[in-house]
Image (cartoon, helix red, strand yellow):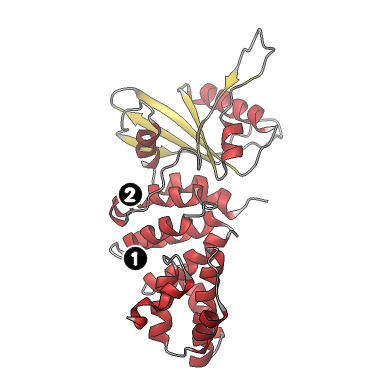
């Protein structure tokens, strides 16, 4: 069954077809910027009843180097059968379109990325015949974008940074930079970025951090995720229920970030019934280094 992170890792390149061009600069690949990018059908099924589909397929047209095909695969774990499938994809596309064909594999953990990047040959060692070696992007080589200005300059690349670093202990900093950057863009631009990020984080603790950032920083958006959060809030009931939900959210964020919570902090948060104060504490919970720091302004 295809997972949400799997879909987000490759569909982001369909959403922003020039993302790979910018990513290639980060990866040090000598590719000229394309003058046009076309999303192609992903069905590689032949006349025989064997269905094969690449995750995402793009055609990049360049004024300098002509055209090439880019097959993009999202890979969540090591799979010994994949190199043969990748070899088939690239050979088939090369044959069908008569264009140079490249393969990009997107991963969320270093071990899978290192495995995917190894060259694998179809023939014996002295007669390799066909060798497949994808370009791989993952937490080992994807930059951590933590500056809101840099995030705002390339929202799709920052989303990819968040997705590939979903298990990083400092993922909250990337997500905070992305949410801050989204405050200044139109809703129709922000909506798909909000959803791709939520999809890409999957069921990891980072997803809860992102949900709370959307609820606090992007509360004016009407995306699927923000509406889901609001529906949960309405289902909790009236003011008292919402206050308790906000208090729980603060404690969840601190817990998921691995920050120790003393009984005094827990009691103070749970007894507060002021929505504005709870909202402020929730915002601070995303960045503080100790639980007590969420009260810093009040203590001062």
Which disc is residue 235 wearing?
none
Q: Is residue 282 left or right of residue 154?
A: right
Q: Decide which of tag 2 and tag 1 comes sooner along the chain.
A: 2
What residue sits right under mark 2 in the picture?
154
Which quadrant holds the C terminus?
bottom left
Circle 1 Cα neighbour tier, 10 Å, few/some/many (<14 / 14–19 / ≥20): some
Tally the numbered discs: 2
The answer to whether residue 130 is visible is yes
Residue reaching furthest top?
Answer: 126
**Residue 151 percent coordinates (x, y):** 33, 53
Quarter-of-image position of residue 277: bottom left
- Rendered image: mark on residue 187: 1
User: Residue at (28%, 54%) from the top-left corner?
Assistant: 149
Q: Quadrant of residue 47?
A: top right
Residue 13 coordinates in the image, percent (x, y): 44, 44
Front-lying residue, 254 or 112: 254
Residue 165: x %, y % from top left: 50, 49
Q: Is residue 298 left or right of residue 83?
A: left
Foreground mark, 2 or 1, reads: 2
Nearest the eye: 127 or 137: 137
The front one of 51 and 269 is 269
Q: Answer yes or no: do the residues labelled 2 and 1 have beta carbons within 8 Å?
A: no
Does residue 218 appear anywhere in the picture?
no
Residue visible at 35% across and 34% down? 25
Regarding mark 2 in the picture, which secondary structure is present there? loop
Residue 247 versus residue 51 in the image, above or below? below
């Amino acid at each position: 069954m295809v997972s949400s992170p799997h879909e987000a890792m490759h569909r982001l390149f369909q959403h922003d077809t020039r993302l790979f061009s910018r990513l290639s600069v980060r990866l040090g690949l000598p590719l000229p910027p394309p003058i046009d990018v076309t999303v192609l059908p992903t069905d590689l099924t032949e006349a025989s009843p064997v269905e094969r589909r690449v995750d995402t397929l793009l055609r990049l047209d360049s004024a300098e180097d002509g055209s090439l095909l880019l097959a993009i695969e999202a890979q969540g774990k090591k799979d010994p059968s994949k190199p043969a499938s990748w070899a088939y994809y690239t050979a088939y596309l090369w044959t069908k379109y008569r264009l140079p064909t490249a393969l990009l594999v997107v991963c969320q953990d270093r071990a899978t990325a290192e495995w995917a990047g190894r060259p694998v040959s179809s023939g014996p060692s002295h007669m390799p015949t066909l060798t497949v070696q994808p370009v791989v992007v993952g937490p080992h080589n994807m930059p951590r974008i933590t500056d809101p200005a840099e995030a705002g300059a390339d929202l799709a690349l920052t989303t990819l940074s968040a997705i590939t670093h979903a298990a990083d202990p400092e993922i909250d900093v990337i997500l905070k930079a992305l949410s801050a950057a989204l405050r200044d863009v139109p809703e129709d631009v922000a909506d798909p970025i909000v959803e791709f990020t939520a999809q890409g984080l999957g069921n990891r603790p980072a997803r809860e951090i992102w949900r709370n950032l959307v609820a606090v920083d992007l509360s004016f958006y009407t995306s699927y995720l923000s509406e889901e959060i609001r529906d949960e809030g309405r289902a909790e009931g009236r003011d008292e229920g919402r206050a308790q939900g906000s208090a729980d959210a603060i404690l969840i964020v601190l817990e998921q970030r691995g920050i120790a919570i003393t009984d005094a902090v827990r009691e103070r948060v749970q007894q507060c019934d002021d929505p504005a104060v709870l909202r402020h504490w929730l915002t601070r919970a995303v960045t503080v280094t100790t639980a007590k720091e969420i009260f810093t302004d009040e203590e001062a």
